[in-house]
Amino acid sequence: MESQRGLLFVALLVVTYLLFNQWQMDNAPIQAPVEVSANTPTANAQENGEFIPAATGSQTSVNQAATKGGIITITSDVLELKVDTQGGDIIAANLLAFETKQGSGVAMPILTTQGFTFVAQSGLIGAQGPDANPAGRPLYTSAQNNYSLASDNDNLVVELSFSQNGITYIKSFTLTKSKYDVSVDYKIINSSAVNAEIQLYGQLKQSTNVDDEDSSMMMPTYRGAAYSTSETRYEKYDFGDIEDANLKEATKGGWVGMLQHYFVTAWVPNKETNNQLYTRYLDNNGQAVIGFKQPLITVLPGSEQSLTATFYVGPKDQDKLEKIADGLDLTVDYGFLWMISQPLFWLLLFIQDIVVNWGLAIICITLVVKTLMFPLTKTQYTSMAKMRKIQPKIAALKERLGDDKQKMSQAMMALYKKEKVNPAGGCLPLILQMPIFLALYWVFMESVELRHAEFGLWITDLSSKDPFFVLPILMGASMLLMQKLQPAMSQDPMQQKMMQWMPVFFTFFFLWFPSGLVLYWFISNVITIVQMKIIFRGIDKAEDKAKLAKNN
């Protein structure tokens, strides 16, 4: 009975956890669709006497490029960027190694101005900063409109230039082979007779009405901002937070980013300087902005200086992100169970390197987890067997004591003590397994390595639901078999009926779970069935041996 209650408790815990996640997402502010305009004013806002970078910048679609000076296309082996020469903003970024949908052949778009706005802006503000000009953003020139990384080169450098008042500004983008981080550099050449006060900023601007197609009640995902400081390595700051209050953080190093399922876009300023992180909310456009400002510098007449920042747009690859900035790898968000999820992820990677197939890796990690947890499983089913053994005595107590709950409770505790039975012995091991299930759930949810990963036969994407619902049905059948093998200890008809329906409820919920997670649960059930048979057979043999010894 205790084990059955424990299973019911775990089921309710899972469903409650998922419903809570979905409730948080559903209650985020939803804004009306944004009408993108090419005539948005570009003046910087003034706050406490300090310039705040313009959050409008380039909102120009590719078709509107002629009125803005043009669009430059920069392509590496993994990235395709489109840069608007008005301001030098990145208005489109496509990940060439990832498809929108499996087999579509269409590169995954991250930054875009089609349908909604998500752009990466950067510029120079300050007294002589060209982006601080109320008349508009600088119009850069470039030698050509298309740049591609040659197959025999490791780097591609694209330069844009702009001059005003005797100062030349050269903005360059450096793409590296097989990398998603882009170096964005400014060279300021001061040929004027006055000091040039310059401050570098970078920011991400996104419409808040974006519908994340990957998110659902069973697979809740986060789309919104995040940042890192020297004090806080990783902190989410969702669109609702940005609308409620402007972020103002001063930190050495740090980074700002926008997250979505499997992918991250981030600005990483100079890690050696004291930077300012900020957010803004544009009420008129329904857009959220998160950005950074590096310290103000002075470029003396007749001299030049350079400023740099790193821009990342790509998959949540923990190894690569960790090397770019401290805490950027934490955008692979395993939640409060990260201390369990992290080693499970590395173990999964290690196994996959050996077996190659991600589905086989999931089966192998299930074997490892169930083997390590066998002592708990044995405790659970041994306790169930003992509880089954004393059921007649419990029934006799109920018949003798009737409705006297106090005496019944005292008699039960005395019986448990005499028979050396722990009433929580069947429930506790089951509850202890819950964190591992949730930890693996987030590993499968957050690991971009599993996106569009094939297993075999009809399972072509372990990160999405089973298209024919075969695995959920097999999982439900395995739960039903486990239920048949377990001793029925509860005499309560209501509890018995609820337990009978439990496999049906689980099958229904698992219809929308990632097939990789359902595969894990199904294999886990199969292993548990084998372990149950071994444990019960051992208990029966021990009882027979004890009876034989007693008779002799």
Image: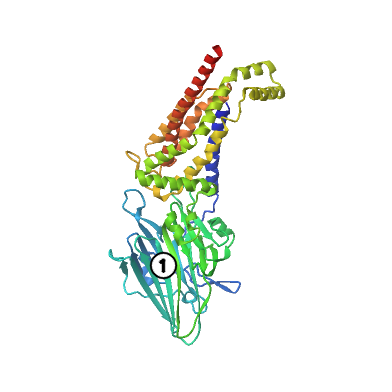
Q: Secondary structure at mark 1?
A: strand
Quadrant including the C terminus: top right
> Residue at coordinates 45% horizontally, 60% vertically from top-left?
323
Residue type beneath disc 1: Ser
Quadrant in the picture for residue 394: top right
Give coordinates of residue 265: x percent, y percent.
Answer: 45, 59
Quadrant in the picture for residue 231: bottom right
Give coordinates of residue 23: x percent, y percent.
Answer: 55, 46
**Residue under numbered circle 1:** 183
**Which residue lies most toward the front here?**
552
> Residue at coordinates 55% horizontally, 36% vertically from top-left?
431
**Which residue lies most toward the bottom here?**
193
Give coordinates of residue 35: x percent, y percent.
Answer: 45, 61
Front-lying residue, 46 or 431: 431
State whether residue 511 appears in this view. no
Give coordinates of residue 529: x percent, y percent.
Answer: 45, 28
* Crowding near the residue tagged with mark 1, few <14, some 14–19, many ≥20 C-alpha atoms within 10 Å: some
Quadrant in the picture for residue 402: top right
Quadrant including the N terminus: top right
